[in-house]
Amino acid sequence: MDTGNTAYVLGCAALVMLMTPGLAFFYGGMVRATSVLNMMMMSLVSLGVIGLIWVLFGFSLVFGDSHAGLIGGFEFAGLRQVDTVVGGIPLQAFAMFQLMFAVITGALLSGAIADRARFWPWTLFVALWTIVVYLPLAHWIFSFDGAVSAHGGWLANALHALDFAGGTAVEVNSGASALALALVLGKRRGWPHEPMRPHNLPSVIMGAGLLWFGWFGFNAGSALAAGAVASNAFLTTMTASAAAVVAWLALEHRLDGRPTSLGGASAAVAGLVGITPACGYVDTFGALLIGVAAGLVCQLAIRLKYKLGYDDSLDVVAIHGVGGVVGLLLMGFVATSSVNPAGRDGLFYGGGFSLLGAQAVAVLVAAAWAFALTALLSWIISRTVGFRVPEHVESGGIDEAEHAESAYEYSPLRTRGGLDRS
C-alpha cells in the first residue's frame, strides 16, 4: 500500500464531497427566496441516500466483476474488504472517492426542476435514478479490465472511449437526465413571461467558488496518484475554466451590453465541465481550446432553450450536458499521449479519426440511456406519488409547504417602543 497516494486520494475525496454543499449554494442562490431551502435540501439528501446505496451495493455493481460488460457483481457489497488494495490504495479509499462522483451527479439533476418539485418524491427519484441510470453507465466507462476486477465495462474496454474524470457518467448523463426531468414535470408557472431572477447572487458566486475549488479534487484526484498526470490534470482544469470565464463574459458583453456575475459564475462551471473528461489527456493548448469552446457554446445553448421552449430552470442541460459533449468530442482532436501514456492521440496529433468516433459513440450512448430511463422513472413517479407541487404551493412558496421553514425572516423587528423602523 502506498500511504502517500492513499492520503492524496482521501484528500481529493473530501474536496469532491465539498462540491455538493457548493452546488447547494450555487443552485440555492439562483432560485426564488421562497424555494431556496427546498433547492438546497435536494442536494443535502443526495449525500444521505446515494451514500447508503453506494456503500451497500452501488460500488460493487460499478466495480465488481463485469457481466457481459454491462454491470458488476455483488462481491464488494458492504465494502468490508479492508485488506483489498487497488493500485496501491485501499479499496475503501477508492470507493469513497468514487462515491462523491455519484452524489454530485444525482444532486445536479435538481437544478432542472427548481421551484416546482416535492421533496420526498425527489428523494425517491434520486435513489431509483442512481440504481437504474448511474450505476450501469458508471460501470461501462469507469471500470477497467484488471483495475479493481478482472473484467470491466464495455465503453472503456471494448470501445476504448476516453473519459478521465466523468464526462459521460457525470456530465452528459446529468444533462440528458435533466432534459427528461424538465420535460416530464413541465414548465414553471409563468415561465418564461414572468421574471424569475436569482434571489442571492453572492450565494451563487460563493457556490461557484466552492465548486471550482472542489473540482481540483474531482479532476486531479482521478489520477489516483500524486504525480505527473495529476499535475497535468490540475493545470488543464485551471486553464480551461479561466479561458471559459473570459470567453463567456466577452460574448455576454457583446450580445447583452454587460458582463454579469451570474454569467461569470456559470462560465467557470462550464469550463470545468468541458475539461472534466479531457483533463488527464490534453495539454495546455487543448485545455485552452476546450475552455473557450465551453464558454461560448454553453452560453449560446442557454439562450437556445427559450426558443425550444423547455424549462430547465438552472441550465443543467446547457452547462453540464452541452459542456460535457464539447469536452468529449474535442478530445478527438486535441488528446495527446505525450501527457498520459494511457491515452490516445487525437486528430491534431496524428491519431486520425478513430478516437473522435469512439467519443461520439460514447456521447450518444450516455445521452440516450440517461434520457430514456430518466423520462420513464420521472413519469412513473409523477403518475403514482406525484412529483410536482400544487399550483398554490408553487406560487406561495415551496419551503413553507414542504419543510415548514423559510430561509429568511420577514417579520418586522420590535422594540419596547413599538416597531423598529430603522
Image (cartoon, grey):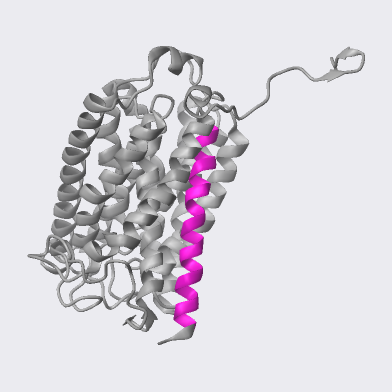
Q: Nearer the viewer, residue 368 or 105?
A: 105
| Residue pictured at 34% horizontal, 23% vertical | 388
Give the image location of residue 226, x and y in percent. Answer: 46, 78
Measured along the vertical axis of the image, is residue 368 above or below residue 136? above
Quarter of the figure with residue 140: bottom left
Residue 16 lies in the magenta-colored region:
yes
Depth check, front residue: 318 or 297 = 318
Vertical relation: 99 (above or below) 344: above
Main secondary structure found in the magenta portion = helix
- On the image, the x and y values in percent for residue 84 come to 32, 81
Inspect this view and state whether residue 308 appears.
yes
Placement of the C terminus among the 4 image quadrants: top right
Tell me, yes or no, whether the highlighted magenta stretch contains residue 156. Answer: no
Highlighted range, magenta: 4-29
Residue in view at x 33 percent, y 70 percent: 79
Vertical order, 165 against 369 (above or below):
below
Q: Nearer the viewer, residue 183 or 334?
A: 183
- Locate residue 182, reporting x and y percent: 30, 29
**Quadrant location of residue 354?**
bottom left
Q: Quadrant of the N terminus?
A: bottom left
